[in-house]
């Protein structure tokens, strides 16, 4: 399985998603995370701790290492141009488009999905990330709007939880963070990972 994360807007959870989907897939078979962002966020994240339970390489190393892995997850930089997006779609089995449930992100997401339609790709799913807790309804409202517009969405969503920031700071996967809500945080990505693996996307 080759899974790529992409978005027009920055800071919507691409790297967090790539890291945790890779951690989930690693339980199914050897998984390689390709850090395709020149900022090297995923690489730097892994180096802050004792390393991830999966291998992280740069785009330049990907061709060599890719041969030996069952799954490959590719993290990309924000704001791909149309040509980049075309290649990203062509280069994976499923493109994850994370979006936070706020107007600016959703607006950027609309542009991306429009392009995907132009490219004629069905191999993508929108993932709502950083969904705020009740009583706020941002997540539900965004889901309703996106479904009404006919966008393919993951059934699961990722909640806004500080455990994810702690994970990035400490160089860990969220399941290894000492936070009382770390398990909840990890379970959000387990559900997404299952949707990917079971082809329920
Ligand atoms: N579910 C979440 N709950 C809380 N914080 C989160 C969550 N997901 C991501 N974050 C935080 O939001 C910030 C942006 O996340 P991340 O780096 O994954 O986004 P990105 O789309 O890769 O950003 P960039 O476009 O800069 O590459 C980080 O500080 C991260 O720790
Ligand atoms: Mg990133």
Image: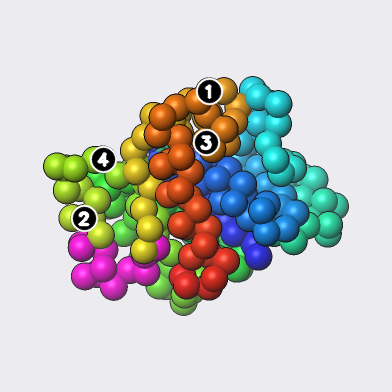
Q: Which residue in the protein does label 2 denote?
A: 140
The alpha-carbon separation of the residues under discs 1 and 4 comes to 21 Å
Residue 1 seen in the current view: yes
Disc 2 residue: CB within 8 Å of ligand 1: no
Task: Check disc 4 and report its element: helix, strand or loop.
Answer: loop
Task: Check disc 2 and report its element: helix, strand or loop.
Answer: helix
The residue lying at 72 percent from left, 50 percent from top is 32
Assess whether residue 153 is covered by the magenta stretch: yes
Q: Residues within 10 Å of mark 2 (few under 14, many from 20)?
A: few
Disc 1 residue: CB within 8 Å of ligand 1: yes
Q: Which residue in the protein does label 1 denote?
A: 169
The alpha-carbon separation of the residues under discs 1 and 2 comes to 29 Å
Q: Position of residue 31 (x, y in %)?
A: 71, 52
The alpha-carbon separation of the residues under discs 4 and 3 comes to 18 Å
Q: Position of residue 116 (x, y in %)?
A: 43, 68
Q: Earlier in the sequence, mark 2 or mark 4?
A: 4
Q: Earlier in the sequence, mark 4 or mark 3?
A: 4
The residue lying at 78 percent from left, 57 percent from top is 69
Seen from the viewer's position, the closer of residues 174 and 22 is 174
Task: Please say if 185 is above or below 80.
Answer: above
The residue lying at 68 percent from left, 36 percent from top is 52
Callout 3–callout 1 Cβ contact below 8 Å: no
Which residues, given as a range, are shown in magenta?
Answer: 144-154
Is 68 on the left-hand or right-hand side of 181?
right
Q: Which residue in the protein does label 4 denote?
A: 132
- Quadrant location of the N terminus in the rendered image: bottom right
Residue 104 seen in the current view: no
Q: Position of residue 163 (x, y in %)?
A: 43, 31
Q: Which residue in the protein does label 3 denote?
A: 174
Q: Nearer the viewer, mark 3 or mark 1?
A: 3
Task: Check disc 3 and report its element: helix, strand or loop.
Answer: helix
Is 81 on the left-hand or right-hand side of 68?
left
């Amino acid at each position: 399985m080759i899974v790529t994360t992409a978005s027009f807007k920055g800071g919507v959870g691409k790297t967090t998603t790539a890291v945790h989907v890779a951690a989930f897939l690693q339980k199914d078979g050897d998984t390689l995370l390709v850090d395709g962002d020149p900022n090297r966020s995923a690489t730097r994240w892994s180096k802050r701790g004792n390393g991830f339970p999966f291998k992280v390489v740069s785009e330049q190393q990907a061709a060599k290492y890719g041969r030996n892995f069952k799954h490959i997850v590719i993290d990309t930089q924000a704001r791909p141009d149309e040509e980049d997006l075309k290649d990203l779609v062509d280069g994976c089995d499923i493109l994850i488009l994370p979006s936070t449930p706020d107007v600016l992100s959703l607006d950027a997401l609309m542009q991306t999905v429009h392009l995907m339609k132009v490219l004629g790709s069905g191999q993508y799913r929108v993932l709502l990330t950083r969904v705020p807790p009740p009583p706020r309804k941002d997540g539900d409202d965004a889901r309703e709007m996106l479904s009404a517009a006919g966008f393919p969405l993951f059934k699961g969503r990722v909640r806004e939880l500080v455990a994810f920031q702690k994970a990035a700071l400490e160089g860990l996967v969220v399941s290894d963070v000492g936070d009382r809500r770390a398990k909840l945080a990890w379970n959000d990505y387990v559900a997404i990972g299952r949707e990917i693996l079971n082809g329920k996307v």
